[in-house]
Image (tube, rainbow, N blue to C red):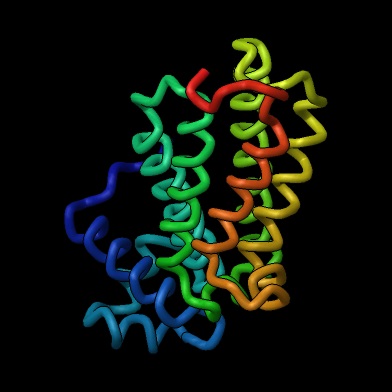
Amino acid sequence: MTRALTQRQAELLTRLEALFLTEGFGHLTLDDIAGRLHCSKSTLYALAGSKEQLAVRVVGRYFKGAAERIEKRIAGLDDVRKRIGSYLAGAAEELNKASAAFIADVSDFPPTRATYERNARAAAERIKAFIQDGVERHVFREVHAALFAEMAGLLIESIQTGVLTKRAGVSDAEAFTALGELLLDGLQRNGASQKE
């Protein structure tokens, strides 16, 4: 069982997350981090046994927090079209907090990349659930929900890694907006009103 964080530890993790999101973490040593946060290395070791474990903890914290904020954003939405649009807009908003250096470092370090991939799979599962709900409610046409979700998941992953946005010359927010339009237009029932 994990011990509860002290208030100081929680504050340090918040500051560490902000630092990593802005600058990445691959180039930072524990000495650099301790200096930037004005704390001792032993304080950092109380959070994690190594810089690598600290990176895993902070990246996990970031993705968990992002998922919670996105879920909160869509909690009261009954309209499945609005839910998908809001979910993708929330993902874009959360990703806009992360610098290219952070995303590159997450991708380059296998343990953080695994966290990142779990997050992309979880997003695909949520979208699959939304699609299935929309099909069952006759808001969306009959489709292979798992296939649509996997395609959306691959697009989300390519947005998160910067591949799609770099190739298309757009921001993450623009890419997520386009993904929402692509999904919702592709799922629309022929002759169906968008207010159904």
In this view, the residue in front, 111 or 172, is 172
Quarter of the N terminus within the rendering: top left
Q: Position of residue 47 (x, y in %)?
A: 37, 60
Q: How many marks?
A: 0
Residue extending farthest front: 191
In this view, the residue in front, 105 or 165, is 165
Q: Position of residue 52 (x, y in %)?
A: 56, 70
Q: Is residue 53 above or below residue 119?
A: below
Instruction: Please indicate whether residue 42 sits to the left or right of residue 181 in the image.
Output: left
Q: Position of residue 85 (x, y in %)?
A: 50, 41
Q: Residue at x 52, y 74 (%)?
A: 102
Q: Residue at x 66, y 39 (%)?
A: 185
Quarter occupied by residue 71? top left
Q: Residue at x 33, y 42 (%)?
A: 3
Q: Position of residue 115 (x, y in %)?
A: 61, 53
Residue extending farthest left: 7
In this view, the residue in front, 53 or 88, is 88
Quarter occupied by residue 142? top right
Instruction: Please indicate whether residue 164 sits to the left or right of residue 86 in the image.
Output: right
Q: Is residue 86 above or below residue 145?
A: below
In this view, the residue in front, 142 or 71, is 142
